Amino acid sequence: MNNIKIKNLTKKYEKNKSIKVLNDISFIFEPGKTYSIMGPSGSGKSTLLNLISLIDSPTVGSIEISNNKIKSNNKVENDLIRAKKIGIIYQDKNLLSDFTALENVYLPNLLISKEKQKSIELAKKLIKKIGMSSRINHFPNELSGGENQRIAIARAIINNPDIILADEPTGSLDSDNAKLIFKILFNLINKNRIIIFATHNRYFANMADCKITMNNGNINVTNASI
Ligand SMILES: Nc1ncnc2c1ncn2[C@@H]1O[C@H](COP(=O)(O)OP(=O)(O)OP(=O)(O)O)[C@@H](O)[C@H]1O
Ligand SMILES: [Mg+2]
């Protein structure tokens, strides 16, 4: 079963004083579904997404992806899991500035396939799908914010990930571009895939099958059908 199980996740940051950002959170994300995460600034949305993307590790608790328990100290293996299974989109600065749009999209695939021509063809196909073919040789600073995000989505999905994580993917966009990005994101739903996005926008959050609201280190879950 291609799900994500988080069990008793607690995340503390020890700076001058210890702060508990996540407090004993357990949840199962199911394939084929979309999940939105809302909550005030500082409530732990990015922290939770960074744990699921295996970029950061919990203070207490565990994460299982497809029934494999993640070993947080095994960076090499976790980097590989992320490369193969997880596509990530941030609010901005997703793309490598010294590489063109096409290069940004095909590079993550080349790392896995080692077949450059195939990776390039696949990247071109994805870029065409999102209507960006006329911009493949542009560098990120030669693209608009919305175009950057569209290329970031193509980059995130080139390895056909089972999991897509988007942390405020439209946080820097106007409403027309934001709608376009969410339209593309929701077109990526398939029965094997889990899509989780954090947003401050209630309208987009309500489009998800399941809404997760974070507050004081805890989550509150509402299903779309309720
Ligand atoms: N590396 C860190 N060291 C110490 N504290 C941190 C660190 N990263 C995050 N925090 C703290 O953890 C809390 C949660 O941060 P997080 O980025 O997860 O919030 P968020 O819900 O994503 O907020 P926003 O909506 O503004 O993006 C904040 O209070 C933040 O100051
Ligand atoms: Mg955040």
Image: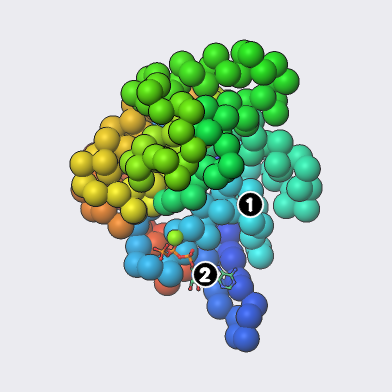
Query: Mark 1 or mark 2: which is in front?
Result: 1
Q: Residues within 10 Å of mark 2 (few under 14, many from 20)?
A: many
Image position, residue 34 (x, y; %): 38, 37
In space, the residues marked 1 and 2 are separated at their CA atoms by 16 Å
Determine whether the beta carbon of the residue marked 1 sits less than 8 angstroms from the nearest atom of ligand 1: no
Disc on res. 55: 1
Residue type beneath disc 1: Ile
Q: Residues within 10 Å of mark 1 (few under 14, many from 20)?
A: some
Quadrant (top left, top right, bottom left, bottom right) of the N terminus: top right
Q: Residue at x 78, y 43 (%)?
A: 76
Q: Is residue 164 left or right of residue 57?
A: left
Q: Is residue 155 visible?
A: no
Q: Residue at x 70, y 28 (%)?
A: 111
Q: What residue sits right under mark 2 in the picture?
A: 21
Image position, residue 35 (x, y; %): 38, 43
**Above or below, comparing residue 54 to residue 135 in the picture:** below
Quadrant (top left, top right, bottom left, bottom right) of the C terminus: top left
Determine whether the beta carbon of the residue marked 2 sits less than 8 angstroms from the nearest atom of ligand 1: yes
**Above or below, comparing residue 65 to residue 62 in the picture:** above
Q: Is residue 89 left or right of residue 56?
A: left
Residue type beneath disc 2: Val
